[in-house]
Amino acid sequence: LLLFFVFWYAGNMKYNEYNTAALNAVGGKTSGLTMTVATMQLGVCAVYAMIMWTIKLNPAKLLGLQAPDKQSMPNVTKADLIKSLKLAFCAAGAHAATVFALGGDPLFGQIVKAAEPVLAAIVGTVFYNKAPTFYKVCCLPIIVGGVAFASLKKGGDGSYSLKFDVTALVFGMLANAFAAFKGGENSRLMADKGIAERYGGVGNQFAVTQMLGFVILLPIMYATEGSKLPTFLETLKTDPSLQFNLVMSGLAFFIYNELATYTLKVTGAVTASVANTAKRVIVMVYMAAVTGKALTDEQKMGSAIAIVGVLLYALIDDLLKSKKKTKAA
């Protein structure tokens, strides 16, 4: 289990690093090729899934010094795939928006991503009739306040003003919204026991979701960045950095998500919440080291406040339940 934690964190860190390097290889956030990079990453995921189905083995558990799982192609029907489209659209949207956000500013993008529970609470309440508890709602202003504080910059005269990367903020919040819908649609889909059985496990479901997401993003990529596709293909043919980082970012994305599933499946809710929160901190510190861009004092304090808020949001109901049980005893 410890190795799954280690490689989950390492995979997430390396994904952020490879993703940043791939975007830089095509010219950065102003190149007009961010959607292409995001789409091709899912293309790598699709190829990896097909290789697993061909050899009928999933090697991910080797990282935990366990025998690889057998993984055959799922027996899903055309109707199952159609039902899976909403989930795939949300997953693809969350992935693409995250790539845009991290391309804008890898550090601030991670801070904005920490506000995911805020969007999850709104979306869950409005669209899925799953409102958070009163105590969870009380934690949301802490998260929002942390992200807001991280957006401040101190001027030479000592006054504060809002200064942040607009791309990272807008697409980070869009990614959070897509992720919230993805969670709701995943619950709806897996509530159908027949579909869950035909998928034959979360590994297959994740693989099919990424493949469908790739197909969904392709026309969007052509519509928004199709004119620059020849430039991308030429760079891909001649630039080893793009070749390496594009493939590795796709593989890292697929594998770290699988390892997260394995890890969280065998841990309790509290451990999972703490692990997710710790992951954000570690990734931010790692990306600061990789990019050479230090967090400002406001970003350090704001991210700390937001992350504490996220941790409280995840744990507060369990903490209060334990307190009530202790009193009752």
Image (spheres, helix red, strand yellow):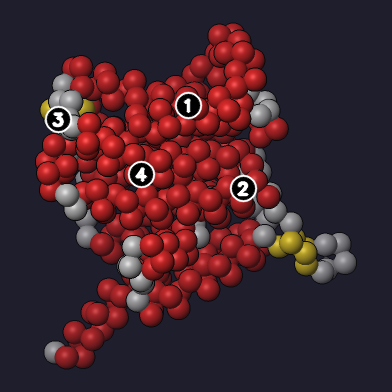
Callout 1 secondary element: helix
Between circles 3 and 2, the one closer to the viewer is: 3
Q: Which residue position is annotated with label 3?
A: 75
Q: Give whichever of discs 4 and 1 has the lower sequence position.
A: 4
Callout 2 secondary element: helix
Q: Give whichever of discs 1 and 2 has the lower sequence position.
A: 2
User: Any mark on residue 86, and which?
Assistant: 4
The amino acid on which the numbered mark 1 sits, given as a three-letter code, is Leu
For the N terminus, which image quadrant?
A: top left
For the C terminus, which image quadrant?
A: bottom left
Q: Which residue position is annotated with label 1?
A: 218
The amino acid on which the numbered mark 4 sits, given as a three-letter code, is Lys
Q: Are marks 3 and 2 in contact (CB under 8 Å)?
A: no
Relative depth, front residue between 103 and 204: 204
Between circles 1 and 2, the one closer to the viewer is: 1
Can the viewer see residue 91?
no
- C-alpha separation, residue under disc 4 versus residue under disc 3: 19 Å
Q: Are marks 4 and 2 in contact (CB under 8 Å)?
A: no
User: Any mark on residue 203, and which?
Assistant: none
Between circles 4 and 2, the one closer to the viewer is: 4
Can the viewer see residue 141?
yes
Q: Position of residue 77 (x, y in %)?
A: 18, 32
